Image: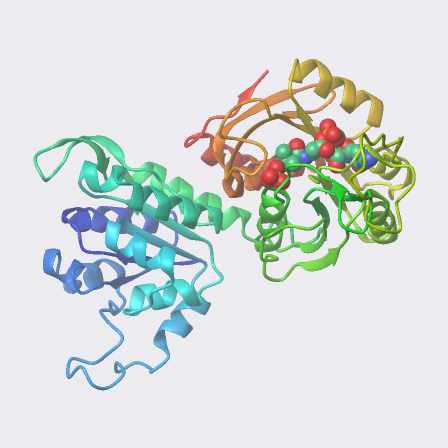
Amino acid sequence: MKVTVGVSGGVAAYKAAELVRALQQQALDVHVAMTQAAQQFVRPLTFAALTGHRVITGLWDSDGATPNAASSIEHIAEAQSCDALLIAPATADILAKMAHGIADDFLTTMYLATAAPVIVAPAMNVQMWEHPATQTNIATLQARGVRLVPPESGYLACGMTGSGRLAESDPIVRAVLEALHRRHDLAQETVLVTAGGTREPIDPVRYIGNRSSGKMGYALAEAARQRGARVLLISAPTQLQPPAGCEMIPVMTADEMRAAVLHHLSQATLVIKAAAVADFRPRIQADQKIKRSGPLTLELEPTQDILAEVVQRRNPGTLVIGFAAETNQPLKHGRGKLERKGADAIVLNDVSREGIGFESDRNAVTFLTPSTAIDLPEMSKRALADRILDEALMLRHPRNVLSEVAANAATSHTPAHRH
Ligand code: PMT
């Protein structure tokens, strides 16, 4: 498999040589692209000698006027032919460009053009790393599926001590292997994901809703798609762009969601119900806007439990994973839901915790099965989506070697606690 290592311009650029070697020891075909600034720190010849391949140093020939010798669309060819793009070291500058879609050199242009998994290993001064601009850019990239190997703490080239030193080769190589293993592991699956919060009309202008933004469900849909699955995304209203390549089925109410889920259920091999579905709806919906005239009593009736129905009506072999949003005694209530609804697993969200759950870009959950409880610690929803899919695959293939390798690699960054 081919990995392109993008080297951007920081002192740690020299460490990329060791990284290239470590990747080659995993039998990977390593190619290198360097930014202009990186070439101030290390000569391209070093990487050419290590890899046996021409090092890509820019979009243009040395005359600065014509596209470089190999091809005028070399960045597209490289973007399409690589199985993973690793940017190490990644400077604050290249992270900012990636987060904002600026494509003004080979590497940033290739990043926009590739569908391969992208891994970044930042290295910079501690204050640059901790600056809100850099942290916001990192969060943006993670939300889009870029994998982060965080910098380590220690003595930095700038003379300061703190976080910002390029991670060791081992965790970076593991992250690349993990991304490669996950790349096609859902190719045989049709994944049906529900997302967002349903709306139950009171009258033509008002509804009963909830705080779900759809971010968790969309992250799951995107992750499954990027791992090769066909994805049916049944979504209540959200402010989000549908992930590329997913088949979108928009719905509004719990009833509409139920109809859409049951209609597509026979095609699904894996169902993930991340949507926050109304448990009650107004018994009567007013035809006209209700006028303000004293107190108003709404009579509510229960909606149907889609998850429980899906469990009953699924094809043999179809895995069903529900979510549970809890505010007190989460484990007890989560286990209760798992048993009552009969799902294969429940992803338990303690939505009383600040900074995770509803609306946030981050989440922390417990993956509950009848016999296990696996804590997946706080991380971006996009990274968590991959971990949830890893656990789902484990249910299907408990001895699937690739999944285990991927899970072990993932564990080295953000350990899962199994109990
Ligand atoms: O969308 P975000 O802002 O990213 O937030 C993510 C989230 C917190 C919404 C999500 O991670 C989550 O927890 N979703 C489930 C919320 C929920 O409705 O939980 P519940 O405990 O009420 O429902 C349990 C399960 O039954 C869920 O899978 C739900 O989809 C399903 N259900 C509920 C009611 C119903 N009538 N039919 C259902 O199928």
x then y, percent, for residue 306: 84, 38
In the drawing, does residue 3 fall left or right of residue 232? left
Can residue 321 be seen at all in this image of the molecule? no
The correct choice, above or below, for 402 with respect to 338 in the image is: below
Outermost residue toward the bottom in this view = 66
Considering every residue shown, the one lying at the far left of the view is 159
The quarter of the image holding the N terminus is bottom left
Q: Is residue 66 left or right of residue 157?
A: right
Q: Position of residue 56 (x, y in %)?
A: 26, 69
Q: Which of these two is toward me, 105 or 26?
A: 105
Question: Viewer-proximal residue, 279 or 398?
Answer: 279
Count of residue discs? 0
Residue at 72% of width from left, 39% of height from top? 209
Q: Residue furthest front?
A: 293
Q: Is residue 413 above or below residue 230?
A: above
User: Which quarter of the picture shows residue 248?
Assistant: bottom right
Q: Is residue 153 above or below residue 137?
A: above
- Is 279 or 181 nearer to us in this picture? 279
Q: Residue at x 24, y 86 (%)?
A: 66
Residue 293: give x, y in percent of width and height. 81, 37
Q: Where 82 falls versus 413 (above or below)?
A: below
User: Residue 133 appears at what percent x and percent y?
Assistant: 30, 46
Q: Quadrant of ligand 1?
A: top right
Q: Residue at x 80, y 51 (%)?
A: 204
In this image, 321 relative to 85: left or right? right
Q: Is residue 174 visible?
A: yes
The quarter of the image holding the C terminus is: top right
Q: Is residue 292 rendered to the left or right of residue 51?
A: right
User: Which colour scheme appears in the figure?
Assistant: rainbow
User: For the point 71% across and 21% down, which residue is it?
Assistant: 334
